[in-house]
Image (cartoon, grey):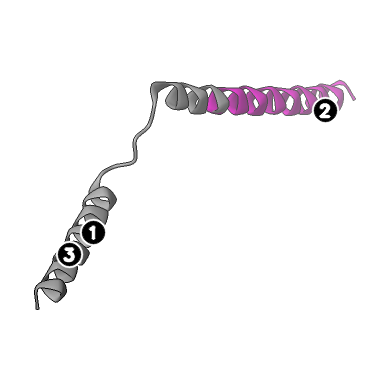
Amino acid sequence: MFVASTVCFLVFMYVASVACRADREPECSRFHYEEQLLEKMVRMEFNVERIQQRLDSVSESCAKLDGK
């Protein structure tokens, strides 16, 4: 009986500790946050440059059509 109650208690404590860890938010270091932010900024810069090229191309096409 004592062994069974001890095993039950240990299982309960294990499940409680796992549940406690699952409830917490994931830890995030400042370095990780800054790295993610930098990555997003680089992607945005790339997209802005690509849009600028497309805009320049469309402007040139419009200028050619107006010149005819």
Tell me if label 3 and label 2 are in contact, CB under 8 Å. Answer: no
Q: Nearest the camera: 4 or 43?
A: 4
Residue furthest to the right in view is 68
Q: Is residue 2 above or below residue 43?
A: below
Q: Nearer the viewer, residue 51 or 44?
A: 44
Quadrant of the snapshot with the C terminus: top right
User: Residue at label 2?
Assistant: 61
Q: Residues within 10 Å of mark 1 (few under 14, many from 20)?
A: few
Q: Residue at x 29, y 42 (%)?
A: 25
Query: Is residue 63 positioned above or below 24 on the image?
Result: above
What residue sits right under mark 1 in the picture?
14
- Residue at mark 3: 12
How would you rate the neighbour count of disc 2 (Cα within 10 Å): few for under 14, some for 14-19, many for 20 or more?
few
Picture coordinates of residue 42, whole percent (x, y): 61, 23
Question: What kind of residue is marked 2?
Answer: Ser
Q: CA distance from mark 3 to mark 1?
A: 5 Å
Looking at the picture, does residue 18 appear above or below residue 62? below
User: In this figure, what is the number of numbered marks?
Assistant: 3
For label 3, the crowd category at 10 Å Cα-Cα, with few meaning under 14, some 14 to 19 and many 20 or more, is few
Q: Which secondary structure, mark 3?
A: helix
Q: Amino acid at mark 3?
A: Phe
Q: CA distance from mark 1 to mark 2?
A: 69 Å
Quadrant (top left/top right/bottom left/bottom right) for the N terminus: bottom left
Percent coordinates x, y for residue 64 in the rendering: 86, 24
Looking at this view, name the residue that lies furthest to the front: 2
Q: Name the foreground residue: 12 vs 6.
A: 6
Amino acid type at circle 1 is Tyr
Residues shaded magenta: 40-68
Mark nearer the N terminus (3 vs 2): 3
Q: Is residue 43 left or right of residue 13?
A: right
